[in-house]
Amino acid sequence: MVFKEIGQGLIKCTDFIGDKGKDMGDKTKTGVEKIIKPLKQLGKQKSDSDDSDDGKTGAVKSAEKSADTKTAFETGARRAQKHMRNIFVKPLEPLGEDFIVLFTPKSEEEKKFLEEALADTFLFSYMSKSERDRLINSMKKKSVEAGTKIIEQGDVGDYFYVIESGTVTHLVDGEQVGEAEKGDTFGELALMYDCPRAATCIAKTDCDLWRVDQGSFRRIRRQHTVDEEGAKEAIRQVDFLKDLDDDRIEKLADAVKKQHFKKGDHIFEKGKHWNFIMIQQGKIMAKNIHIGGSDIDDHVLVTGDVIGERNLVSSADLVMPGDGMALSDGKLYTISRERLQTILQGLPLEEMLRKWLDKKVLELTPALCPLDPAEFDELASLVETVKMPKGYVISSLGKSCSPAYCIIRSGKIEVKSKTETNTYTTEGYFGANTIVGLKDAKSKIVSQETITVLEDASVGILTPAVIESVIGDLGRLGKKKPKRNMESVTLESIDKRKILGAGTFGQVWLCCIHKDPTPYALKVQFKREIIGYNQVDGVMREKKIMAAIDHPFVIGLLKTYQDAQSIYMLMPLIQGGEMHNVIYTDSRDGVSENVAKFYSANILEGLIHMHSKRIIHRDLKFENVMMDKDGYCVLIDLGFAKNIRSHYTYTFCGTPLFIAPEVVLSKGHDTGADVWSYGVMIYEMVIGRNPFYDGKMDQLALFKAIAKGKFKFPRDIVISRECMEIIKKLLTVDEDDRLGCGQKGTCEIRKHAWLKKIDFKQISNKEAKTPWVPSIKDPFDATHFDDWKGLEKKKKKLKALSPKEQELFIDF
C-alpha cells in the first residue's frame, strides 16, 4: 500500500491487496511510519458512537475526542497493554464420579441474604439460579474479632467474602481508602485466579463473614457446565445419535446442559418453544399431543427417548405439540435448536452421517494426505451427489475429460486402465490421480482410464474448482513438505551467539550449527526453575504441540535436547521483532485498514492450522506474534497452548486485555477463545487501542467490560462498514453466535466480506507483497530484539536435581 499526504493529516492510500499490488515504497523501519500510518477523519464521520449533539461541528468534536483519546491512551493504555502480564491458573484435576461439594447448612433467612448480596456481584450475576444456589450452599461462615486482618495487600488471595454483620476497613499502602458493611462483598478476583490482593482488609468491628474458596468455585462451575461422561451416555442411548462419530458426540456432550427433575414437575408445555431433550433417567408422561392434524395417544417417555426431534429437520419454528409431566425423579440433557443446528450444520442426520463417511474416505486418500482436518471437514460438506445409470461411460481411455474426485455412494463402477481393471462399490473412490499435478482447476485432461457404471450408481463428486476453493492451491495435493533432517545435529554442535530474550525460567539464544550459516533460535529452560514453578506438565505439553505444528505462520520445533540442568528446544529464527512494535510506535497507534487486513489474513492462516489440529493458543496477542525476515506474521510462544480434542478446557489463562468472556466467567472454552482474541487484535490494529480498556480501570472492571462485550468505534478513525461488522461478529459474547465458532470453524472467517479481496493462496505461499519488510543486515542480525548482553556471561547456580526429579523430564 502506498500512502500520500493530502492535507491536514488525511492520508490517501492505494490498495495493495490481491493482484493490484503497487510500489510499497520505503521498507526500512522508518518506512513503517510512512506506509502504515492510520487514516484519520477530521470531518464529521458517522459511527457507532452515541455521543450527544452539543452543537459543535463534527471536526471540532473529532479533534477534541482525538486529543482526549491521545492523552488517555498514550499515557496509560498503551503502556499498560505492553506490560500487562499474562495469567495462568493451575488446571483442575478431573472431577470423578464421587466428587461432591460440601454444603454448609443455612437458614432460609441466611440464604435470602446471600442471594440479595450476590445478585449484582459480577461473577455471580452471570450464573443460573441453580448454579448460584449451589455456590451459596457451599459458602462457610467465619466470625472475626475487631482488629483482625482478614486479607493483606500483596498476598495471593484464595477467598471471596460477603459481610453479614460488622464493618471492614480497606487500606492501600497503609492509607484507608474505604469501608464495607453488611451486604458488601470483597475479594472477587481471587475466585478467578491467584491474584495478589490489591488492598488490606481489617475488621473495624466484630464481623460475621461468609466466604467461598477458588477451588470450590471453579469445581462447581465446571460440574454445572458439563457432565461429560453422563452426557455422552445419554447421547448414545438415542438410536439415531448413537452411531455418530466420537468427535460429534463429544461436541454434543460439551454443548448440552444437564437438568434434574422431580416427580410432578412440568417438563414441557403445549404451544411453547422447545429445545431438543434427551432423557437419561426417569419417566415423563406425554399427553394432549396433536401433530399434523392427528391426535396422538398419551404415552410414557423413558430413558433413551427424545423430545424435539421434529425440530431437527424442519425449517419452521415449531412449538411443543403436547404437555409433559414427570412420573418419577430423573435427569435429562437439553440443547437449543440453534446450537444443535450449528453442530449438525442444519442438515438431516442422514446427511450428517453421510458427510462423516465422506470425510473418512477423504482422509484415507493418499493424494489428499497433506490437508488439514478442517479442510477435510469443509470438503466433505461440499461433495455433490450425481445419479449415474447402468452403462454410462464416465470417461474413455485416451479421450479428453474433466478431472474430478469421486466417492461411490451406491452401485458398482469399473475403472479400466491399460494395465489393470478395478471394480469399486459403496465408499470406494476414484479420480484422485486426475487432480494431482493439475495447474488450472478449469483445464481438461486426457483420460488414462475407461470408467464405466456397471450398476445404477449414486456418486459424490468434488471438482478441482471446489477443492481449490477450500485448500487454496491444488499444488499441495500429493506432496509432503520436505523437512530438514536434524538427526545429526547434537547439542554440542550448536554455537550460542547472543541472547534474544529471557523469562521466568529460561532464555532464548540466537545460535547456529557448526559450519552452517543458517541462524536458529535455541530456547533454554532450567529444570530446577520449571519444577519450582510447577510447570513440568506445561513444558512437556508445549514440546508435543510444537512438534505437531507444520506451518510457515506458526513457530515449529526442529529438535529437543536435555542435560542435567536444562532442557533445550531448537527452533527456526523469526528475525523481524514483535508485531507490537509494528502496530504501536512512538509516533502512532494502529495501522491503516488495508494493512490490518493483510496482517489479519496472515494471522488467520496460522490460527486455522492450529485449530485444524484442535490446538488452541490461549494467549494470542501482538507480543506473541513475530515478524519474519519477509514481513510475514508468525505465531509464537505456545506455552499456554493446549490440544483440546473436542473438549472444553477450564483453565483460567491468557493476557487480561485479550481474554474471552467465557474464560473470564469460567464457563469452559475452546477455539472460540482464540477467535475472540483475534477480534481484539483487529480492533487494535485499525483503532489503535483496546476495545475494552480505558487506560485507568482496574482488572475487575476490565473483566466486567469484557463479559458485557460492549465497545464503540471512535469517530476520528476511518474504517469501512465491513471492518466494523467483522469485529462485531468476532467480539460476540455468546460463542455460539461468534463468527468462526460454527461447524466450519475458523475457516469461515475467510469468507467474510472484509476479507473478500484477500488472496489467501498468495499469502500462504508467501508470494504476496507485505506492507513492511524489516531491515536485516545479515543472517545473525539481532537489532529487532532487546539487548540482553548483561545476561550472556552470567550462569545461574541452581541446586542439582535428584534422580527422581530427573525422571520428570525423561520423555522430553
Image (spheres, rainbow, N blue to C red):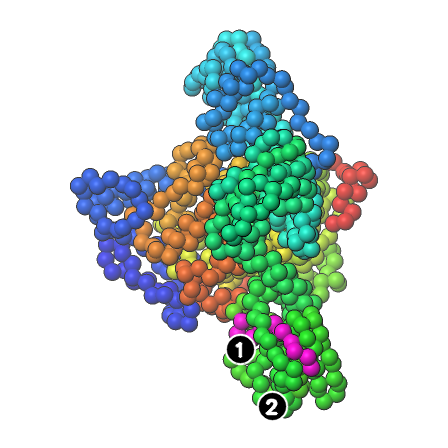
At x 47%, y 15%, the residue is: 182
Compared across the picture, whether 484 is left or right of 34 comes to right
Write down the region rendered in magenta: 454-466
Looking at numbered disc 2 in the image, what kind of residue is underneath it? Lys
At x 47%, y 50%, the residue is: 317
Q: Does residue 261 appear in this view?
A: yes
Residue mark closest to the camera, 2 vs 1: 2
Residue closest to the far left = 55
Q: Is residue 211 above or below residue 773?
A: above
Circle 1 sits in a helix, a strand or a loop, which is it?
loop
Looking at numbered disc 1 in the image, what kind of residue is underneath it? Ala
Residue 132 in percent (x, y) is at 55, 28
- Quarter-wise, where is residue 18 in the image? bottom left
Q: Nearer the viewer, residue 319 or 790?
A: 319
Q: Nearer the viewer, residue 408 or 630?
A: 408
Circle 1 residue = 441
Circle 2 residue = 399
Q: Nearer the viewer, residue 326 or 490?
A: 326
Q: Nearer the viewer, residue 552 or 185?
A: 185
Circle 2 sits in a helix, a strand or a loop, which is it?
loop
Residue 4 in percent (x, y) is at 29, 62
Q: Does residue 651 appear in this view?
A: no
At x 45%, y 27%, the residue is: 120
Residue 444 in percent (x, y) is at 55, 84
Label 1 CA crowd tier, 10 Å (few <14, some 14–19, many 20+): some
Q: CA distance from mark 2 to mark 1?
A: 18 Å
Label 2 CA crowd tier, 10 Å (few <14, some 14–19, many 20+): few
Q: Is residue 460 magenta?
A: yes
Q: Is residue 24 above or below residue 578?
A: below
